[in-house]
Image: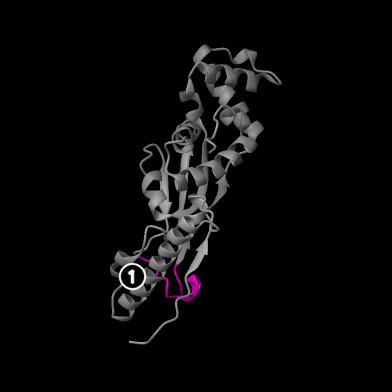
Amino acid sequence: MSERTTAMKVIKPSVEIIDMDDYEKIIRKIEKIGRVCYKSEENIADGTAERFIGNILRRGHESVIEHEAVTVRFTCDRGVTHEIVRHRIASYSQESTRYCNYTSDKFGNEITVIDLASGFEYDLNKEEDKKKYEIWERSMKEAEKAYFEMLEAGATAQEARSVLPNSLKTEIVITMNLRSWRNFFRLRTEKAAHPQMREVANIALAEFKEKLPLFFEDIEAYQD
């Protein structure tokens, strides 16, 4: 069996909004739908959408905002996606370790892992954090080596994936309606959330607050 130099790549998590309609278009749509409940369509005018939606959100009438959805790509570790997919009202498409062979050129002939120090906010100048990081980094390299050895021994990608770590980088595309996103952010940005889960949720929430302020301005991300 040929010897192979470890070439593992370490990256930080990221979030990309793939599909989100224009804010003004969304609020006009939600107002038009919501006013059916009260048969108050005659009250629609310039500037009424935000006030109407704000009022129904304050009353907890969130079913109305289920009529609009947003699609987002999360690049994170596989452990985080195990938590993400527990959210029921959503559609998911995820990078598959059954079909992706990380020895191929398209993956740079290496595995990519999500930086542990980022999510857990390690201070690598501190001896304790440095030691934990070094153990993690060594384990990732050993996992990559075992993965490549499995493939060299004739294993398929779906067999070899059994030695890949939770820290493996994965991409998952998520589509949720606005009500489900509100629930997602409430749960996944709070103090009790896993630090790496909270990290990507906070990145996404900041984007949602900027682009869809009316629907997410009341959700406050936990800060250490």
Viewer-closest of 195 and 97: 195
Residue at 38% across, 45% down: 83
**Relative to residue 17, is residue 67 depicted above or below?**
above
The residue that disc 1 covers is: 157
Q: Is residue 157 visible?
A: yes
Residue at 55% across, 58% down: 125
Q: Residue furthest right?
A: 46
In reply to whether residue 110 is colored magenta, the answer given is yes
Residue 206: image quadrant is: top right
**In the image, 216: left or right of 104?**
right
Residue at 52% across, 33% down: 68
Magenta: main secondary structure equals: loop
* Total residue callouts: 1
Image location of residue 209, percent across then percent down: 61, 35
**In the image, 167: left or right of 221?**
left
Residue at 56% across, 39% down: 205
Image location of residue 49, percent across then percent down: 64, 22
In reply to whether residue 187 is colored magenta, the answer given is no
Of helix, strand and loop, which one carries label 1?
helix
**Relative to residue 130, is residue 182 depicted above or below?**
above
Quarter occupied by the N terminus: bottom left
Disc 1 crowd rating (10 Å Cα; few below 14, some 14-19, many 20+) is: many
Q: Residue furthest front?
A: 127
Viewer-closest of 136 and 181: 136
Image location of residue 60, percent across then percent down: 48, 19
Region rendered in magenta = 99-111
Q: Is residue 100 visible?
A: no
Image location of residue 210, percent across then percent down: 64, 37
**Disc 1 residue type (three-letter):** Ala
Viewer-closest of 166 and 154: 166
**Relative to residue 215, is residue 60 depicted above or below?**
above
**In the image, 3: left or right of 68?**
left
